Image (cartoon, rainbow, N blue to C red):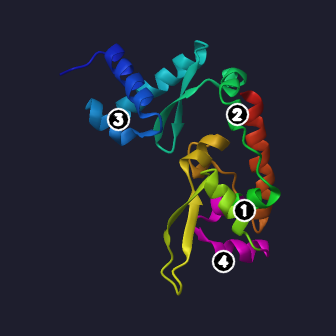
Amino acid sequence: MKMELQEIESALESLLFAAGDRVPLDKLSEILEIDKKTLKLILQNMMDKFRNSNRGIIIREIDNGYQLCTNPENYDYVKKLFEPRHKQGLSQAAYEVLAIIAYMGPVTRAKIEQIRGVNSDSALARLLERNLIKETGRLDAPGKPVLYDTTEDFLRSFGFKSKNELPSLEGNEILLVQENLRENLNNINSEK
C-alpha cells in the first residue's frame, strides 16, 4: 500500500502525539513501512513547516528519534498551566556532577567524587529525581558500583540532539563545562 505524503505526515503527527515521548526513527520506519532515509527527509520537512508556520507545536529531533513538543514561544502560557509544580534550579554541585556524567558517562559515583574531591550523594540524588541522569548498570569491579549516564530528558532540557553535540573539551576542562550547561539551560528557558 503506497501512502500519499499528506497521509504520512498525518500518521507521523498522530504517532508522535500518542507516544508523548521520543519515538526512535527505526520504530517510525517500521510502523509506517517507509525507509529511514525517506522518513527522515519527511520529518525534516515537517519540522521546517512547523517552525515557519507559527504553530503551537514543533517536532524535535532527539538522539535519532523524534518528539512532538510545545513551541518554546508559548512557554509563558504553558508555564501557567503547571505553575504549582515549580522546580527549583540546580546547585553548583549538581551542575558539576551533571557535566562529569555528560562527558564521561557511564561513570561511577567514586570516579565523580575523585574528580570533584567531595561527596556527591546529594547532587546525584537531585539529578536522579529530576530525571537528568539514570543508573545504566553496574561496573564489573569489586562491590559492583552503579554506573550513571545522562537521559533523554537531559538532551531535551539542554537542547541537544545527542551527546555528540556537547562542546569538545581539552585537558581537565570538565569542571568548567557546568557553566556552559547552565548558560545553555538559561538560554533555552529565556526562549520559551
* Stretch in magenta: 99-118
How dense is the environment of label 3, judged by Cα within 10 Å: few (below 14), some, or many (20 and up)? many
Secondary element at image label 4 = helix
> Could you say which disc has been placed on residue 83 in the image?
none
**Residue type at the position of mark 4:** Ala
Residue 74 is drawn in which quadrant?
Answer: top right
How dense is the environment of label 2, judged by Cα within 10 Å: few (below 14), some, or many (20 and up)? few
In the picture, the quarter occupied by the N terminus is top left
Secondary element at image label 2 = helix
Residue 104 in magenta stretch: yes
Q: CA distance from mark 4 to mark 2?
A: 36 Å
Q: Is residue 136 left or right of residue 85?
A: left
Above or below: residue 132 compared with residue 48: below
Q: CA distance from mark 1 to mark 2?
A: 23 Å
- Residue at image point 69% right, 57% down: 126
Which residue matches tag 2? 84
Please name which of the two marks, 1 or 2, marks the residue nearer to the observer: 2
Please name which of the two marks, 4 or 1, marks the residue nearer to the observer: 1
Which residue matches tag 4? 110
Which residue matches tag 3? 28
Secondary element at image label 3 = helix
Please name which of the two marks, 4 or 2, marks the residue nearer to the observer: 2
Please name which of the two marks, 1 or 3, marks the residue nearer to the observer: 1
Q: CA distance from mark 4 to mark 1?
A: 13 Å
Which residue matches tag 1? 123
